[in-house]
Amino acid sequence: MSGNAGVLQALKDTFGFDAFRGRQEEVVARALAGESTLAVMPTGAGKSLTYQLPAVLLEGTCVVISPLIALMHDQLRSARANGIRAATLTSADADWRETQDAFRAGELDLLYVAPERASQPAFREFLSNSSLCLFAIDEAHCVSEWGHDFRPDYRMLRGLMDAFPTVPRLALTATADNQTRADVMAQLGIADNGLVLAGFDRPNIRYAIRHRDNPVRQLNELMANEPGPGIVYAQTRRKVEDLAEKLATATGRPVLPYHAGLDPEVRAANQAAFVASEDIVIVATVAFGMGIDKPDVRFVAHVGVPKSIEGYYQETGRAGRDGDPAQAIMFWGAGDFATARQRLAEVDEARRNAERARLDALAGLVETAECRRAVLLRHFGEDPPSRCGNCDNCLEPASVTDVTQLARKLLSAVYRTGQSFGMGHLQKVLTGNEDERVRQRGHDRLSVFGIVEGDEARLLQPLSRALQARGDLVATEHGGLALGGSARAILRGERTVEIVVPPKRSRGRRADATP
Ligand code: ADP
Ligand code: ZN
């Protein structure tokens, strides 16, 4: 077909590519045919091209809604480098006049704006007498309250687009579970048959999720085996700085911090150094990464849990974009979930259930003995094989143990001691340690005193972690543990509890004697 040949020629002429990747072609074809689409494609799949190419081929301007000025300017630079006539209208631009003139004269292929501006009546007015070919909505999950990054301004876009009913819409996102996906389509007025879902699998990334006992030692071990560039995500600015310093000392490698509290010049310099380097490790908050194009990141490590599976996928997806082997490794602790679940109380009631469901899904991934990749891909609605051969659980199978009885012992100890003691104290009570504090409180006279013996005691910590991850044990303000979630159902014998017992690893701690 000559039409198709024309598109391929334009692909070659504009971007220098010989072929489409994944499902790009389908998305482009839909836009060219005037059909609206939600394209769900992983980071690095090449979403930008799917609206830029139609923008070049079609008469009129493609209006691109994008949530971040930095992101828009990155896109602007690369579009212009490919000879595409593009401009941005943001508060950071001084060339508004020229942009507006160029737009009115029909000399722009792409016009990038933020949702706050796009939703204003003045912008609708501005567009009204010109020729438009497409609305592209980048990071479209922001339109949904189910998404992990809800932006109320995205809700207003519908009004703008409805004012131009003949202009097709192309919504783009890397992160959409079933619910978010359906919501995005409904909110943006995209018909059900307009969904193009590309593969989420990143086969070259090896996933591993481990309990965190000593992050500096654990990261040191990782970095000793991986000399290439890496990103370590930590949860707070303070932790970023602390970890960056300790890692530099422990490993002797170049390690730089990155967080929103750093001087903007330092931040930009650290980012630039990282992008250009072949060995720098950057320790960062999640503020780092969006819009950064570095294909050879060899590992992404999380110290503490990400906000959701979507966040985990997006952050780990920054590893190995060049297709060479890369690692994604998470070091988690029970406290991460405890804090996250405590924060639920502060969330708007309307959003709380969605947030809780996200945490539960994440806990499921962290705790699973199944293939990590299979769990991830199923979360995104795919139907993957049950084993990938390239994750910790496939490579070193973990075993699942039924610990229902032990869970009932632990939960009743929590209950009988008044739901205000931490795991250390509970362990002493359960194992019959006549510590002074135990005696003072009279806990040595409780029926649960000393009811956990021998081998079982070893499972108390992993069990407590699992129960906290699931929300069956919740942390109190003063660091104690209280019953939550399904704790009462477990106590009543209505629920069983299984935990994953990790394989004894030969590296690090010598724990490889006998099981
Ligand atoms: P996304 O927005 O989905 O994260 P980008 O649009 O930034 O991805 O594209 C990621 C990288 O893939 C870019 O470097 C881009 O040039 C490259 N790319 C996109 N499409 C193709 C293609 N058809 N062939 C080769 N490389 C491509
Ligand atoms: Zn696997």
Image (cartoon, rainbow, N blue to C red):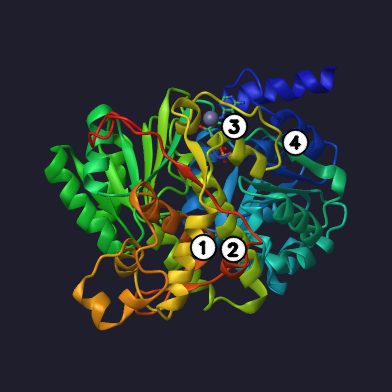
Q: What residue is shown at x 54% (from left), y 71% (from top)?
A: 484
Q: Position of residue 203 (x, y in %)?
A: 54, 26
Q: Is residue 499 visible?
A: yes
Residue 383 or residue 129, whichever sits in front: 383
Counting residues from the start of the chain, the first of labels 2 and 4 encountered is 4
Q: Amino acid at mark 4?
A: Val
- Position of residue 409 relative to residue 220, above or below, is below
Q: Tell me the element at label 2.
A: helix
- Left or right of 96 on screen, residue 256: left
- Position of residue 82 relative to residue 459, above or below, is above
Q: CA distance from mark 4 to mark 3?
A: 19 Å
Write down the residue under mark 4. Answer: 27
Q: CA distance from mark 1 to mark 4?
A: 53 Å
Write down the residue under mark 2. Answer: 490
Residue 349 or residue 108, whichever sits in front: 349
Q: Does the beta carbon at disc 4 come under 8 Å from ligand 1?
A: no
Q: Are marks 1 and 2 in contact (CB under 8 Å)?
A: yes
Q: CA distance from mark 2 to mark 4?
A: 49 Å
Q: Position of residue 340 (x, y in %)?
A: 47, 66
Q: Position of residue 144 (x, y in %)?
A: 68, 62
Counting residues from the start of the chain, the first of labels 3 and 1 encountered is 3
| Disc 4: CA contacts within 10 A as few (<14), some (14-19) or many (>=20) | many
Q: Tell me the element at label 1.
A: helix
- Numbered mark located on residue 408 in the image: 1
Counting residues from the start of the chain, the first of labels 4 and 3 encountered is 4
Write down the residue under mark 3. Answer: 201
Q: Amino acid at mark 2?
A: Ile
